[in-house]
């Protein structure tokens, strides 16, 4: 005969399981009943609140619609934000300021003051010659000056070469060119110190200019 093991677990029937669950629910083991009922209460309150809010939003929308219609009927300028209507009710002082502002926009303020001729920093009488953008007179980049300036593209005869003043200096030769201002953008051969070479477009003009002596004003 087989010995019965007292430690073996006896299978629990479905009725016993239901009885245990019912007992746990009634005695509120682990607060299961409390949590369940609380969650159900919160859910019911939320449903009630959402339902009331929908009705409240609908009421507010209807009220706002009626208010806008009333504004259009009784106060059209406010409802339309009519800027012209509001401006038509300015007082005398405000109207005068508006007119004055409009007049200022078309008022002539006169001409700007004329700049006076500046005094040269130095004057010197030196020989002056002319040159063109020719490889025989310059180098393999005849249009580009020592400062990197393109005289051919510039095309204006107001560029000179000189060694005794910094690049970018302004000079004037009143005896030969009146008030025309020349820009020092190029250099000459090192052996020519006190001398100026004027750039010209036409080689015939440069030859006809030749070599002349005149006073140079340095600014």
Image (cartoon, rainbow, N blue to C red):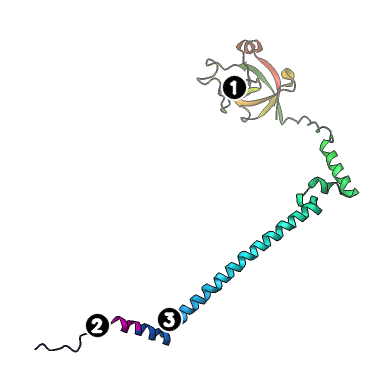
Reply yes or no: does residue 62 show up in magenta.
no
Q: Which residue is mark 3?
A: 32
Residue bearing mark 2: 11
| Percent of width and height locating residue 14 | 30, 80
Q: Which residue is mark 1?
A: 153
Q: Quadrant of residue 189?
A: top right
How many residues crowd around disc 2 within 10 Å: few (fewer than 14), some, or many (20 or more)?
A: few
Q: Which residues are magenta?
A: 7-18
User: Counting residues from the N terminus, which is met first, the one under dot 3 or under dot 2?
Assistant: 2
Q: Position of residue 188 (x, y in %)?
A: 58, 22
Q: Which mark is residue 130?
A: none
- Out of 175 and 57, give the one closest to the viewer: 57
**Residue placed most toward the observer, 26 or 99:** 26
Magenta stretch: includes residue 12 = yes
Callout in the foreground (2, 1): 2
Disc 1/disc 3 C-alpha distance (Å): 94 Å
Gap between marks 3 and 2 measured at Cα? 26 Å
């Amino acid at each position: 005969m087989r010995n019965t093991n007292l430690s073996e677990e006896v299978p629990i029937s479905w009725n016993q399981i239901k009885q245990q669950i019912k007992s746990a629910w009634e005695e509120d083991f682990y607060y299961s009943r409390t949590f369940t009922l609380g969650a159900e209460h919160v859910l019911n309150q939320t449903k009630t609140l959402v339902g009331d809010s929908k009705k409240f939003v609908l009421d507010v929308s209807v009220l706002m619609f009626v208010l806008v219609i009333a504004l259009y009927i009784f106060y059209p300028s406010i409802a339309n934000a009519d800027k012209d209507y509001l401006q038509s009710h300015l007082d005398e002082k405000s109207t005068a300021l508006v007119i004055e502002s409009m007049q200022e926009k078309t008022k002539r303020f006169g001409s700007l003051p004329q700049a006076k001729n500046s005094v040269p920093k130095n004057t010197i009488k030196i020989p002056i010659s002319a040159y063109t953008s020719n490889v025989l007179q310059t180098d393999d980049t005849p249009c580009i000056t020592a400062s990197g300036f393109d005289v051919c593209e510039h095309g204006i005869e107001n560029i000179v070469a000189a060694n005794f003043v910094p690049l970018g200096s302004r000079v004037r030769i009143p005896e030969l060119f009146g008030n025309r201002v020349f820009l020092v953008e190029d250099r000459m051969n090192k052996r020519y110190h006190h001398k100026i070479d004027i750039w010209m477009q036409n080689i015939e003009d440069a030859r006809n200019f030749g070599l002349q002596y005149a006073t140079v004003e340095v600014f």
